[in-house]
Amino acid sequence: MTNPQLSLTVDGLTIPQLGFGTWQLEPADARRMVAEALRIGYRHIDTAWIYKNEAAVGDGIRDSGVAREDIWLTTKIWTAHFERDALLRQAEESARNLGFTPDLLLLHWPKAKPTFAETIGALNEAKDQGLTRAIGLSNFPSGQFREAQRLSPARLVTNQVEYHPYLSLKTLRDTAAELGSSITAWSPLAQGKISDDEVIGQIASAHGKTAGQVTLRWLVQQGVIAIPRTTKAERAAENFDIWDFQLSDNDMARIHALNRADGRLGDWLDKDFQWDKV
Ligand SMILES: NC(=O)c1ccc[n+]([C@@H]2O[C@H](COP(=O)([O-])OP(=O)(O)OC[C@H]3O[C@@H](n4cnc5c(N)ncnc54)[C@H](OP(=O)(O)O)[C@@H]3O)[C@@H](O)[C@H]2O)c1
């Protein structure tokens, strides 16, 4: 059977558009759920040094029996490690924890000090040393996204940011497109809040799907990468079952219209920076 899941090509790299997130998963759950997700068919796993589960994620990949080269694996440099030497040390530690070289290494949150020039330079060095295949960002507003790419010889292949029906990302999506990059949506299910949404519920009933499936389909149909998380095998399977239906333009517009001013769920942005207005 051909593989129906969608991927994006960014800077010549193929990134599966549906990944499995592991934030807040204790090591035992991370190991079990990563193996389960890969058995279900996911081919993209997201972790971070600060999640304290990189070793368990590596174990889950080995348990699954899926070949490493068939998986897109992302981890992130924590903000305490943004000086050059510390960044390179963490990149080595993350690869050691995982037992694999990651495909993608992200800067977890933008930070004013040290300078972007130092941190982006070190991230490029990590790539040049073979500590990752590709590099990118997380939680960078448009201005800092542009500045980081200006300083980076290598393409920053994604900016992983909060994105779901309650938070518009129009400006940042346009910036990513302009820079030849991509957006990866964290908290794509608004941490489960989409379950109670009337509009999403109506669209889900019309398609014979669940609210979670409709929300993830809305993201991938925009050309966005989404990385939902769950502790439950049956939900991981539900969230992966989105390749056999399409949302209409009207469905897409109705979900976009759910954007609201207080929709942001997680905000640890350095006080020197500001989110895009929309
Ligand atoms: N770069 C960053 O700064 C950053 C920040 C936050 C997150 N992330 C990444 O993004 C991933 C996803 O974000 P997230 O974990 O915050 O939130 P999320 O995926 O939007 O939501 C996870 C929550 O939704 C529930 N859930 C899962 N599938 C569901 C479904 N089909 N219907 C209803 N509820 C469902 C889960 O509960 P159960 O476990 O009970 O199923 C869990 O409580 C993270 O795991 C992490 O990898 C990155």
Image (cartoon, rainbow, N blue to C red):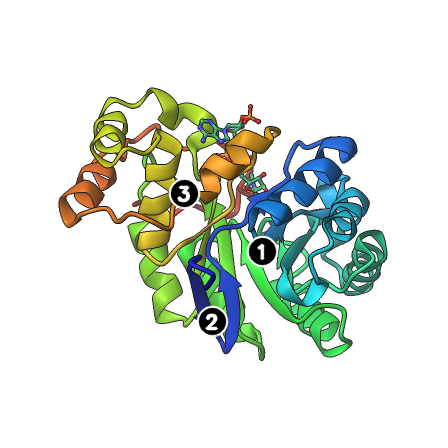
Q: Between disc 1 and disc 3, whose residue precedes?
A: 1
Amino acid type at mark 3: Tyr
Query: In the image, what residue type sits under mark 1?
Result: Arg
Whether ligand 1 has any atom under 8 Å from the Cβ at mark 2 is answered as no
- Mark found first going from the N terminus, 2 or 3: 2
Q: Residue at x 42, y 60 (%)?
A: 6
Q: Where, by quadrant of the figure, is residue 73 drawn?
A: bottom right
Q: Is residue 148 above or below residue 230?
A: below
Q: Residue at x 67, y 73 (%)?
A: 124
Q: Is mark 1 within 8 Å of ligand 1?
A: no
Mark 2 is on which residue type?
Val
Residue 43's label in the rendered image is: 1
Residue at (58, 77) in percent of width and height: 154
Q: Nearer the viewer, residue 95 or 276?
A: 95
Choose mark 2 or mark 3, whichever is in front: 2
Q: Pinpoint residue 37: horizontal percent, then vertical percent.
A: 61, 44
Real-space Cα distance between discs 2 and 3? 19 Å
Query: How far across and how far down the image is residue 173, in percent?
Result: 35, 57
Q: Nearer the viewer, residue 273 or 157?
A: 157
Residue, disc 3: 163
Q: Are marks 1 and 3 in contact (CB under 8 Å)?
A: no
Q: Which residue is mark 2?
A: 10
Residue at the far left: name it: 250
